[in-house]
Image (cartoon, rainbow, N blue to C red):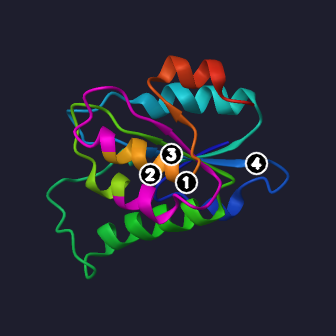
Amino acid sequence: MIFTSPESIAKRDFSRRSVFLGGSIEMGKSIDWQKDLANLFLEADFNIFNPRRLNWDPSWEQTFENPYFYQQVNWELNALKISDIIIMYFIPETISPISLLEFGKYSTSDKMHVICPDGYFRKGNIECVCNIDNIPLYDNLDEFKEKFVW
């Protein structure tokens, strides 16, 4: 089953592994890569946590006091915590500062897989952390699909 924010993840099937599809979402700059991977993980019988919120309003003030913003951040942090696998995809045309924060927070969790093509502005940093923390690093989605052990 696919869960998107703000949908409750408490209804997930506890007999299935769960994957969080994190990384570049920046509206207008990022393709909807989560949709592609979600279908593959569905076929492999996973719960999928997709933070790409369909009704996101970029005018929302990004403060703790804003209930919509708080709900989004809380949903993502909960989904990251309970996921068995975390995918982070850094698209070159994006900056993705929150994805970088989440990458750093979970780099030592042993559940991270990273896709980072040439051209991402901090690829060197990503490569160093992946090397140090023994995180699988893929150059593109096709390589991930080919090499990821389902």
For the residues marked 4 and 1, what is the alpha-carbon distance in whole angstroms? 22 Å
Q: Which quarter of the figure has residue 94?
A: top left
Q: Is residue 29 above or below residue 61?
A: above
**Which of marks 4 and 2 precedes in the sequence?**
4
Q: What's under tag 1, amino acid-wise?
A: Asp
Look at the image and tell me whether residue 38 can be seen.
yes
Q: Is the residue under label 1 in contact with that under label 2 (CB below 8 Å)?
A: yes
Identified at 21% across, 31% down, the residue is 93
Q: Secondary structure at mark 3?
A: helix
Q: What's under tag 4, amino acid-wise?
A: Arg
Q: Is the residue under label 1 in contact with that under label 3 (CB below 8 Å)?
A: yes
Q: Residues within 10 Å of mark 3 (few under 14, many from 20)?
A: few
Q: Which quarter of the figure has residue 73?
A: bottom left
Q: Secondary structure at mark 4?
A: loop
Q: What residue is disc 2 on?
A: 129
For the residues marked 2 and 4, what is the alpha-carbon distance in whole angstroms? 25 Å
In percent of width and height, residue 47 lies at 69, 46
Identified at 45% across, 70% down, the residue is 74
Q: Nearer the viewer, mark 4 or mark 3?
A: 3
Q: Secondary structure at mark 1?
A: loop
For the residues marked 3 and 2, what is the alpha-carbon distance in whole angstroms? 5 Å
- In the rendered structure, find residue 133 and report the number of the disc placed on it: 1
Q: Is the residue under label 4 in contact with that under label 2 (CB below 8 Å)?
A: no
